[in-house]
């Protein structure tokens, strides 16, 4: 049994409010249903990344992300609150080995922006729509990494000068997204995110 757990990944980050429990293949002696503890700051909601293999892969932008509120059961997974050693955690039951994090305002804003862009029609783009979507998804992931590292101004710069510019926010830039209604909606979502990041930046001083 001990050798079967050599590749076990079990990690937690209190500052980034996320954790992971992963093993490529679980021994038959271990129950299929497992639980993880996710650090809480009181948001009341978590997200799960069923395919995460490391803590770095735990993100609200992960593939097949699931969002669950405290007290809810979604696809056999349920969330409750527990306190340990003065720290509040989400106790997530029913996982098979996965990563999860707290789903607060910043995670929701980031996910909503990415979901909106990924849901645009091909006609909304000047050309190469799928290539553009993939590139923008990667840029949004870079923004979230900067936020996790508390590099708020760098995240704002990325949103203003790169992502917004690609959505038609800069007259000197070759726009990727050409539909005006989509551009306006993306501007609003980016502006909301920037306002929140500026508040976080000021609060960190």
Image (spheres, rainbow, N blue to C red):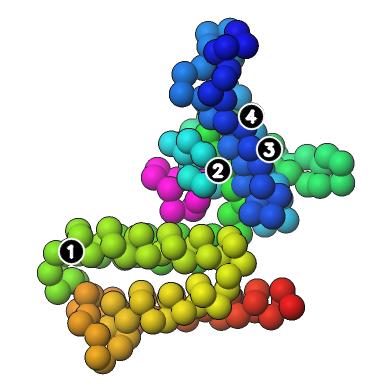
Label 2's element?
helix
- Relative to residue 98, is residue 103 depicted above or below? below
- Does residue 149 appear in this view? yes
Give the percent coordinates (x, y) of residue 165.
32, 81
Which residue in the structure is indicated by mark 2? 55
User: Label 3 crowding class (10 Å Cα cut-off): few <14, some 14-19, many 20+?
Assistant: many
Residue at figure coordinates x 17%, y 63% from the top left: 129
Tags 4 and 3 touching, CB below 8 Å: yes
Label 4's element?
strand
Disc number placed over residue 35 in the picture, else none:
4
Give the percent coordinates (x, y) of residue 172.
24, 91
- Relative to residue 110, is residue 26 depicted above or below? above
Tags 1 and 3 touching, CB below 8 Å: no
Tags 4 and 2 touching, CB below 8 Å: no
**Quarter assignment of residue 177:** bottom left
Which mark lies nearer to you, 4 or 2? Answer: 2
Which residue in the structure is indicated by mark 1? 129
- Which badge, 1 or 4, is on the more N-terminal residue? 4
**The magenta segment:** 58-65
- Which badge, 1 or 3, is on the more N-terminal residue? 3
- The CA distance from mark 4 to mark 2 is 16 Å
Quadrant containing the C terminus in the rendered view? bottom right
110 with respect to 139 (left or right): right
- Which badge, 2 or 1, is on the more N-terminal residue? 2
Disc number placed over residue 37 in the picture, else none:
3
């Amino acid at each position: 049994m001990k050798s079967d757990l050599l590749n076990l990944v079990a990690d937690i980050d209190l500052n980034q409010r996320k954790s992971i429990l992963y093993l490529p293949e679980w021994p038959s002696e271990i129950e299929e249903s497992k639980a993880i503890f996710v650090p809480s700051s009181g948001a009341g909601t978590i997200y799960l990344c069923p395919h995460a293999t490391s803590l770095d892969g735990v993100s609200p932008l992960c593939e097949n992300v699931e969002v669950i509120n405290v007290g809810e059961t979604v696809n056999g997974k349920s969330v409750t609150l527990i306190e340990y050693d003065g720290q509040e955690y989400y106790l997530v039951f029913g996982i098979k080995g996965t990563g999860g994090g707290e789903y607060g305002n910043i995670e929701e804003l980031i996910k909503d922006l990415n979901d909106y862009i990924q849901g645009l029609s091909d006609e909304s783009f000047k050309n190469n729509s799928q290539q553009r979507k993939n590139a923008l998804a990667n840029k949004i992931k870079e923004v979230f990494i900067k936020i996790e590292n508390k590099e708020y101004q760098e995240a704002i710069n990325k949103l203003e000068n790169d992502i917004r510019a690609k959505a038609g926010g800069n007259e000197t830039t070759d726009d990727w997204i050409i539909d005006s209604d989509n551009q306006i909606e993306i501007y609003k979502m980016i502006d909301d995110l920037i306002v929140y990041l500026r508040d976080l930046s000021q609060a960190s001083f």
